Image (cartoon, rainbow, N blue to C red):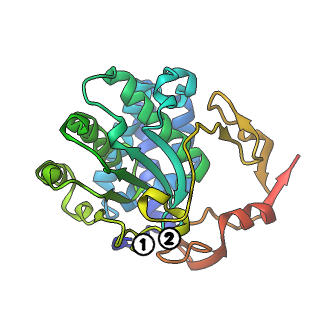
Amino acid sequence: MSSMPPEPTKAEINQLRTAAVQKIDTEGVTYDPQDVKRIRSDDKYIRRFLMHHDNDQKLALEMVMDTLKWRYENQCNAITKESVPDDFFVKGAMYIHNRDRDGCKMLIFVVRLHQKGVLDMDLLNKFFIYWLERLEREEKGEWITVFFDMCETGMKNMDMEFIQYMINLFKNYYPWFLNYIVVFEMPWLLSAMWKIIKTWLPPKSVEKIKFVDKKSLKDFVDPDQCLINWGGTDNYEYKFEPEVTPLDEPVLNGDVDFRKVHFAEGSSLPPASPLKGKSKVRQAASANGSQFYFDSVIVGLLSLDIY
């Protein structure tokens, strides 16, 4: 896990929210009401913009407004599995599975199953947004790791345009969302391409890219979370798994109805944040200091008030 910027105070969070709401109310630009509601009410989401820019209010505000505009233009909240042809999900070039050593969910990109120039780029981009939006819902904004499985990858598989799009989304529209980019078993012939990819990231984010092989992967992913072909013990074989609600109910179209679950009145338990090397204990930082809570699954069981 990379170094942490200073934790925003409640006053700093309110300052950014006030500035964003003022722009929303006065600029006359149309945004998605769901996104506007999140800006008005979700402290954790506002905090992410500040963390992303080391508490720089000006840069954070610019990112908030750019994100609102981009999300409306791309109708992010309306993207479901049905928004993308089934062919994208059948071959398993991208999917969610297991967690890294920090407890962060992994979005796995099996690069050898992707061939540049074959798929419609607009649909490919929407496919990627689907996974990010789903992870936002399922992980409640906690960090994720993008795992590039480069085994048996050749030049025809390296889609620089798509990879640039992926990095651009983390850089500009999904604040404080990325733990690591793990690049597994990269062929040496493709090393020059990854040098170019590094230039697309801010200097402080370059450290998030980790090049690993079967021996060093254990530093970032425990063996029981690694697939057998990565040198681990997980014999998982890909099949598309429908999204689930907090009640573990399948959501076939990607739409999640959170009205069925809410936190008990007066609950002070905030969503968890990953702490390196401690997947079962998470650190939740606040303006009043740091508190430690059990894994989010246990927290959910203790604090959910179901009706």
Front residue of 114/107: it is 114
Identify the disc placed on residue 36.
none
Decide: is 61 above or below 214. above
Categorize mark 2 by other alpha carbons within 10 Å: few (<14), some (14-19), many (20+).
Answer: some
Give yes or no for contact between labels 1 and 2 (Cβ–Cβ under 8 Å). yes
Q: Secondary structure at mark 2?
A: loop
* CA–CA distance in space, label 1 to label 2: 5 Å
Kind of residue at disc 2: Asp
Left or right: where 4 falls relative to 265:
left
Residue 184: image location, x then y, percent: 32, 58
Residue 38: image location, x then y, percent: 55, 43
Q: Residue at (30%, 60%) from the top-left corner?
A: 56
Left or right: where 60 falls relative to 71:
left
**Corner quadrant of residue 119:** top left
Residue 283: image location, x then y, percent: 56, 74
Q: Is residue 93 visible?
A: yes
- Please give the residue where the numbered disc 1 appears in the rendered image: 218
**Corner quadrant of residue 115:** top left
Kind of residue at disc 1: Lys
Decide: is 272 above or below 190. below
Front residue of 233/243: it is 233
Left or right: where 45 falls relative to 299:
left
Q: Residue at (42%, 28%) from the top-left corner?
A: 126
- Please give the residue where the numbered disc 2 appears in the rendered image: 222
Residue 103: image location, x then y, percent: 54, 66
Q: Residue at (69%, 42%) from the top-left corner?
A: 244
